Amino acid sequence: MLVEKIMKKNVITLSSTATVLEALQLLQEHRIRHIPIIDKEKHVIGIVSDRDVRVASPSILDKQANQQVLKKEIREIMSTPVVTIHPLDFVEDIAKIFYEETFACLPVVREGKLVGIVTEKDMLYTLIQLTGTHMPSSHIELKVPHEPGNLASILAVFGKRKLNITSLLIYPDHEDSNYKIVVIRVQTIHPLPVVKDLQTNGFEVIWPKPLQGAEE
Amino acid sequence: MTCKSSFVYSKNLLNYHFYADHPFNQIRVRLTKELLKSMNQLHEHSIMNPRMATDEELALFHDRTYIEAVKLASKGELPSSKQADFGLNTDDTPVFEGMHDAAALIVGGTLEAIDAVLQNKVSHALNLSGGLHHGFKRKASGFCVYNDAAVGIQYIREKYNMNVLYIDTDAHHGDGVQWAFYEDPHVCTLSIHETGRYLFPGTGYVNERGITKGYGYSFNIPLDAFTQDESFISIYENAFREIIDFFKPDVLITQNGADAHFLDPLTHLNSSMKIYEQIPLLAHQLAHEYCEGRWIALGGGGYDLWRVVPRAWAQIWKVMNDNQPFTGKLPNDWLLKWQKEAPVTLPTYWHDLEEDIPVIPRKEEIMEKNNQMLEHALSYIKTQRNLK
């Protein structure tokens, strides 16, 4: 999956001469946490987070505090240089940046110009979609020997029953590296017939499990 | 206490029938009706005929294009390229002849039940053929073609302008009804169900609370698999009381899926018959406390057709009428008649025998998790109350 598929194209931005107060208002009004700072040519020259702005603002508990700081220009507090990504980058690679770095937002830049933004939240939403749990479906989990051909035989069982699969995930089996855990979300309220077929075909179904499974 | 109530029934309601071995089978409604008759608790004057819902009524919730598609499919004239779009002819909702009429009759049954209660002809009404809560605006899903609950609630909104509280205790999330009123502050929904982590439809997280004006009017309490009676009843009572006191509805609609039982083949909540005594008892009590009695109860899921659903559903009618659940033995004539048909041994008593109820080892842990869900679900009410 490419960044351009998950990025937000409508980006809220400010110029470097905007005030800290403007940034504060913008963050609250749009309920966002990051504002890229751009110049006239839409080059990203910095970024401010809600934390940058809060650190720079006077304490709300201190009524006498000098409010003048709110009139300062944003370039004094913005972070720079900014790590940016490209619309054709892979989402998987972006996830690694988020995992390794301490920031939670990446401006997307094409030919030097800002074209979008991806946040950790967008990444998580993508993950939810990968798991298929946003569509009506049932969860089936199998423990499968890590050998060629098994997945094909499993999917053939679903195909025979004309069942539509909404997502398919393969995890490592942490207890036994010779096996994989295959999780399939399938568009049916009644997964039992296909579960039976899978078992008849020799596959180990972990979920749904029979009642006695509760007494483990 | 005795309350005047209506029981929606016609043998035509049994026409909502996919095929012989399909898990959703309306023979449940007939089994329940005959069980009540055997107990001498259902009299002809209480039985109300359903009517066919009109296209205009169905369109209160469903898309016209969808209604047309269902009609075509009923005659076998919907091209297969279009079926998938509407969720038709899938494994869950295969097309059958006369499907539109059968589904529209169920909706009409719910509308009749609503009219009878809201025109003060009776205090309560029961349509066990209804409660098809998975139906979407333009898509069949989870055995449901038309969503009688969603159509019915919109009908109440437009015809009677009342605020509706919808309580869904089916083991599956009441997704169709929830999404139908997700932006509507006049309809409050509560769904208590087995977590969607594994079970269909997968939605019903505690943080699905509604959007825009409807924010704070959708409640979801996903329960752990193997929850059993004690935790289920305590969560149900707490949530129901808090929410009805917060929302103060004019009318109560309950969806009474009977698929949380340990014998149900599709789910894993592992309750016993006990919850099916407590569910209607509290609904009945709170309907009188908050809604001047106005309560319409619907059926829903329930896939142990013989041993679970007739007993569970008969209790709703009994409680609706005299607030006393049945106890003791099931009537002999009913057992004799249906044991011949049933592929399983029918139970002898209204309650489940202690030795038949599975023992679940992680009980404390499951209760704790469920209570946490309850806290989360009700947190919005608590903050609203503190603001006042």
Image: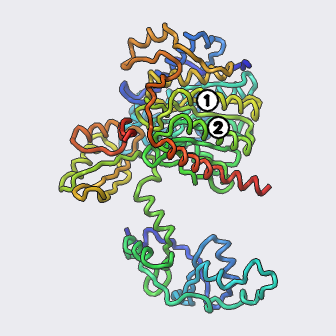
Q: Is residue B256 left or right of residue B161?
A: left
Q: Mark 1 — on which chain does it sit?
A: B
Q: Is residue A187 left or right of residue A149?
A: right
Of callouts 1 and 2, which one flags the residue occurring earlier in the amino acid sequence?
Answer: 2
- Front residue of B370/A4: it is B370
Q: Is residue B307 left or right of residue A67?
A: left
Within the image, what quadrant is residue B110 found in?
A: top right
Does B56 sit above or below residue A155? above
The spot of residue A132 in percent (x, y) is 42, 54
Q: Is residue A167 visible?
A: yes
Marking on residue B237: 2
Residue drawn 47% across the image and 26% down it: B16
Circle 1: element type: helix
Q: Amino acid at mark 2?
A: Glu
Q: Amino acid at mark 1?
A: Gln
Does B375 sit above or below residue A32? above
Q: Classify the position of the C terminus of chain A by image quarter.
A: top left
Marking on residue B226: none
Residue found farthest to the left: A148
Callout 1 crowding tier (Cα within 10 Å): few <14, some 14–19, many ≥20: some
Residue drawn 69% across the image and 82% down it: A22
The spot of residue A191 in percent (x, y) is 36, 40
Residue carrying label 1: B278
Callouts 1 and 2 on one subunit: yes
